[in-house]
Image (cartoon, grey):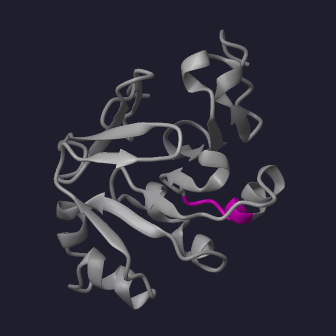
Amino acid sequence: MNEKGIDYRETFHPLGNYSPAMKGIDLLYYGNGRLSSNIYVLEEGRTLIDLGNFAGLVAELKEHYPQAQVERVIFTHAHFDHIGGLGEILTHWNPQIIIHKVELEGVLPGGTTLKKAFQEMGIEDFMELEGNEDIELCDRKLRVLYTPGHTPGSISLYDLEKRVLFSGDTAFPMM
C-alpha cells in the first residue's frame, strides 16, 4: 500500500475515493513496475483510455460495470502494453478508436501500418488526432495534447475543468 492508501495488489481503484477531481474515473492496474499497465475507465465503462495487454480485461469490466457498453477507446500511444487488450475488447464491443494519426501511420513488423492492421481486425471507426482537439464526453471534456517523445504519436489528455492529466507514458518516473 502506498502513502495515499492505494493497494496496488488490487486491480480496481475508484480514483474518486482519493481526489474529488478524479470522481468518475476508475483505474484498472495490472502488472508490476516496468511491466505494469494503467487502464482508465470513464463514463461507467463507455470510454477507456489505453487497454493494457493482460487477459481478463473484459471480465474485469463486466464485474465492475455489468451494463457497460464500450463506445470509444482512446490510445495515448501504440506500444503493446497500451493497445494489446484491443483484441479482447473487440470480442464484445465495436468501439471507436481514437489515436494520433502518426501512430496509425506507423509501420509494423511485416511492413503493414497500424491502421491497416486495425482495419484487418474489422475496425473502421477511427478518430485520427493531430493535437488540440477536444473530446466531448458525458461529464467532461478532454483536450488532446500532442506530446511526441515516448513515441512519435504520443498524446496526453487534459481535463481543463477538473485539471486532470492522463499522460500515458509521456511523463512517468524511471524505475
Front residue (pair 36, 69): 69
Residue 27 is situated, as x and y percent measured from the top left of the image, at 63, 39
- Write the residue at 49% across / 40% down: 34
- Write the residue at 35% across / 48% down: 135
Front residue (pair 135, 107): 135
The answer to whether 166 appears left or right of 127 in the picture is right
The answer to whether 106 appears left or right of 120 in the picture is left
> Where 152 sits versus 20, above or below?
below
Residue 68 is situated, as x and y percent measured from the top left of the image, at 71, 60
Residue 91 is situated, as x and y percent measured from the top left of the image, at 64, 80
> Where 136 sits versus 69, above or below?
above
Front residue (pair 18, 139): 139
The answer to whether 41 appears left or right of 145 in the picture is right
State which region is magenta: 53-58
Q: Quadrant of the N terminus?
A: top right
Which picture quadrant has residue 74?
Answer: bottom left
> Where 93 sits versus 73, above or below?
below
Single out the residue that lies furthest toward the top: 3
In the image, residue 152 lies in the stretch drawn in magenta? no
Residue 53 is situated, as x and y percent measured from the top left of the image, at 55, 60
Front residue (pair 140, 121): 140
Is residue 127 something one can see in this rendering?
A: yes
Q: Quadrant of the C terminus?
A: top left
Q: Main secondary structure of the magenta part?
A: loop
- Write the residue at 62% across / 73% down: 88
